Image (cartoon, rainbow, N blue to C red):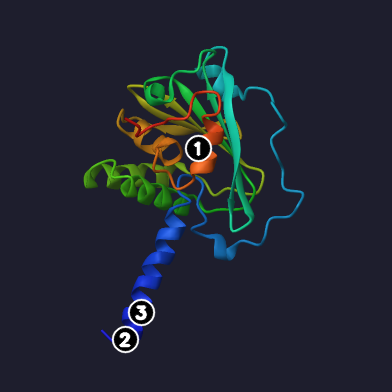
Amino acid sequence: MTGAAARAGPRSAKRRTAQALLAGALMLAAAAAVPATPASAPQFARGGAVPQPVAAHISDARLAGEGLLRWFGLRVYEARLWTGPRAPAPETLARSAFALELRYARALEGRAIAAASRDEIARLDLGTPAQLSAWFDAMARLFPDVAQGDRLTGVNLPGSGVAFYRNDRPLGSIDDPDFGPAFFAIWLHRDTAAPELRRSLLERAGTRGAGDR
């Protein structure tokens, strides 16, 4: 390997890692092809009504927290965490029905979202290689390309899997009880790549989350 190649290798790996850290239906894996977000990008109404898919799965759902993900100053998405009327302690959240709703401020490809989600789950050391491969295939089939203003909602179904919705319309589900805790750890694990967003999402559920001991 030449000196130039040796220098390029770490830089390339670092760039791939930076992209993956935006994982989960979140990432800027395709950001280079997306223009800067206009100031008029849609936003959640403050407080807002409970989305229909959330109400269908969670009785008397309440907003546990909300926040904004930015990447180098660019808006990526807004996120809201919905729980039941009595929000469980964050460390037991994965054993409860809850929903994570994302409103995108920029366009992203569904396959890039799936790949970045898989990479972030792997970074957190969750799932076996076989599970990561199966989960990626399932996410790549389900996750659509998103445009500015689109909402993706994932509903945790404890002991079953995760049901996904786009703009309140069903996309399908990933029926694996191990998938939900691993997928939502992207946002709720103590080692998440977006700790400030995690704190905002868990605002009314304490300061700890998936992965805490």
Residue drawn at point x = 49 percent, y = 25 percent: 206
Separation of marks 1 and 3 at Cα, in angstroms: 34 Å
Mark 2 touches mark 3? (CB < 8 Å): yes
Q: Which amino acid does label 1 sit on?
A: Arg
Taking the image as shown, residue 134 lies to the left or right of residue 40, namely: left
At a point 45% along the width and 18% down the height, the residue shown is 88
Quadrant in the picture for the C terminus: top left
Is there CB contact under 8 Å for labels 1 and 2? no
Marks 2 and 3 sit apart, C-alpha to C-alpha, by: 6 Å
CA distance separating discs 1 and 2: 40 Å
Q: Which residue position is annotated with label 1?
A: 198
On the image, which quarter does residue 203 sit in? top right
Tell me the SS state at disc 1.
helix
Picture coordinates of residue 9, whole percent (x, y): 34, 74
Q: Does 34 appear above or below 166? A: below
Q: Residue 79 location, x and y as percent?
A: 58, 37
Q: Is residue 119 above or below residue 93?
A: below
Q: In which quarter of the image is the N terminus?
A: bottom left
Mark identifier at residue 7: 3
